[in-house]
Amino acid sequence: MSGILEKKWYVVKVVTGQENKIKNYIDNETSRLGYADYMEEVLVPTEKVVQIRNNKKTIKEKVHMPGYVMVKAHLAGEVVHIIKSIPGVVGFLSETKGGDPVPMRKSDVSRMLGQVDELTETIETIAIPFEVGETVKLIDGAFNGFNGVIERVNEEKRKLEVMVKIFGRKTPLELSYTQVEKM
């Protein structure tokens, strides 16, 4: 049956950070409910990133398009409803006024799939310049000139949680890498 169903690429908007979980959920739900023939592929575009921390290199996969999952499917019958009812799915990227998903143009699909292939081959290097426990000086913002200790490093957002002593009390501040300097 899978040979006679015409499948096209669609973009599904999802909650950022849950792309892989939702990809697995789509695969599992369509199979469980008997719609596996309607679904050809579910794709989360990722890229390989080398992170350097404490002079150690680690390679991580990072989601290239946060908040989006691509599906190649024949969206007929209950398939659209199944996908939209999955926790974390916001909807389809482009829909008609009646709520029907609009497939991607062939040129966009080719470009996107080409980028996905390219991203799996290239490796981006990101050096994490700060580490937990390190003392830094604030050089920007309301607390310019204060010193603090890094409590947490958020590599994705390139933010730091710095504990600063203000009027004798320890106060956590979320700062970008550019708002602090090493002491």
Image (cartoon, rainbow, N blue to C red):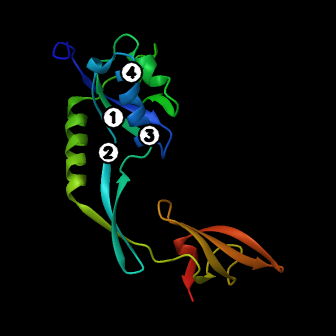
Residue sitting at x 48%, y 64%: 155
Q: Position of residue 45 (x, y in %)?
A: 32, 45
**Rounded to the nearest whole Å, what is the CA distance between mark 4 and mark 2?**
24 Å
Query: Dot 1 corresponds to which residue?
Result: 70
For residue 29, side relative to residue 85 (left or right):
left
Quarter of the image with the C terminus in it: bottom right
Q: Earlier in the sequence, mark 1 or mark 4?
A: 4
Q: Residue furthest left?
A: 3
From mark 1 to mark 4, how far is it between C-alphas?
20 Å
Name above or below for residue 34 compared with residue 42: above
Number of other residues with Cα within 10 Å of mark 4, as a class: few under 14, some 14 to 19, many 20 or more: few
Distance from Cα at disc 3 to Cα at disc 2: 14 Å
Gap between marks 3 and 1, in whole Å? 13 Å
Helix, strand or loop for disc 4: helix
Residue 26 vs 68, above or below: the answer is above
Mark 2 residue type: Pro
Image x and y of residue 154, in percent: 53, 64
> Which amino acid, by three-letter code, is at mark 3?
Lys
Q: Which residue is located at x 46 percent, y 77 percent? A: 129
- Please report contact status of discs 3 and 4: CB closer than 8 Å, yes or no: no
Q: According to the image, label 4 marks what residue?
A: 32
Number of the front mark, 3 or 2: 3
Foreground tag (4 vs 2): 4
Disc 3 marks which residue?
21
List the single residue furthest toward the front: 32
Residue highlighted by disc 2: 45
Badge number at residue 13: none
